[in-house]
Image: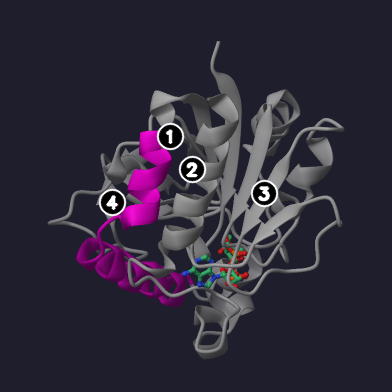
Amino acid sequence: MKRKLVISTGAGMSAESGISTFRDAGGLWENYPVMQVASADGFRANPALVHEFYNQRRKDLLKAAPNAGHYGLVDLEKDFDVYVITQNVDDLHERAGSKNVLHLHGELMKVRALDNELKTFTLTPANIETSPDTRIEGHAVRPHIVFFQEAVPNFEPATELAAEADIFVIIGTSLAVYPAAALLHYVRKGVPVYYIDPNPAQVPADVHVIKAPATRGIEILARELRAQNS
Ligand code: OAD
């Protein structure tokens, strides 16, 4: 039976696709006041600004393509039962072909009805701009993004995946945002944990840190995991 490989990704996963991270030098939160563009209060205060921020993120995403790291994770599906839990709102894991992707912080290419949060709509590349005046099937919409100050509905299924992992891998996250950063605590004792990041955050001593960008780090990881299988 294939071992269950659960991979938790953050903004660093998409950095080599040209998408800005949040907290690195020059990151998004250096240029945009996070509480204005990505919080529940910010959306209430100035929805037009928030729509505009995510319109811009969608334009950036349309110019981007999955990198070798995204494809490397798909390739691991040959030998492992792979599940990706991502904090990223981009769709690069899906576009690379990953089968199981759980989004913790929402999805950039989706919006949802303001009067019914279960009703989501997928935007098409030709139609990515939304505003407070946009109506889809009669509904005013908001970005399908988990804003700061909001609960993370997919956290519970993510904790279940983490608890079932035979191998747990963290890629490209500063581990600064909760509850995503707490997923590691749900991994069973004795399960090997790897962390790929060129500038890793503080992690427990038994985590195997691969200090490298995602593309190279995933190559190193794949070699090591496959060597264990043979
Ligand atoms: P951060 O910007 O906080 O952290 C990015 C991480 O990626 C850092 O640890 C970098 O060292 C690392 N990194 C940079 N380049 C890399 C590369 N080429 N390969 C691998 N890693 C690289 O981003 P997140 O931790 O993902 O939420 O941020 C978490 C959440 O904060 C985001 O989902 C977003 C943000 O506010 C929302 O907007 C809801």
Magenta residue check for 70: yes
The spot of residue 158 in percent (x, y) is 66, 34
Q: Residue furthest top?
A: 1
Q: Are marks 1 and 2 in contact (CB under 8 Å)?
A: yes
Q: Which one is closest to the eye, mark 3 or mark 2? A: 2
Return the residue at label 4.
Answer: 135
Return the residue at label 1.
Answer: 76
What amino acid is at disc 1?
A: Leu
Near-viewer residue (10 or 129)? 10
Return the residue at label 3.
Answer: 194
The spot of residue 197 in percent (x, y) is 59, 65
* Side (left or right) of 10 relative to 182: left
Span highlighted in magenta in the image:
47-75
What amino acid is at disc 3?
A: Tyr
Return the residue at label 2.
Answer: 222
The spot of residue 45 in percent (x, y) is 57, 75
Residue 91 in view in this figure: no
- Measured Cα–Cα span from mark 1 to mark 2: 7 Å
Q: Residue furthest left?
A: 126
**Badge 1 element:** helix
**Badge 2 element:** helix
- Measured Cα–Cα span from mark 3 to mark 2: 11 Å
Near-viewer residue (159 or 187)? 187
- Measured Cα–Cα span from mark 4 to mark 3: 44 Å
**Badge 3 element:** strand
The N terminus: image quadrant: top right
Q: Regarding ligand 1, which quadrant of the image does it lie in? A: bottom right
Sequence-wise, which precedes: disc 4 or disc 3? 4
Residue at the spot 80% in from the left edge and 67% down from the top edge: 202
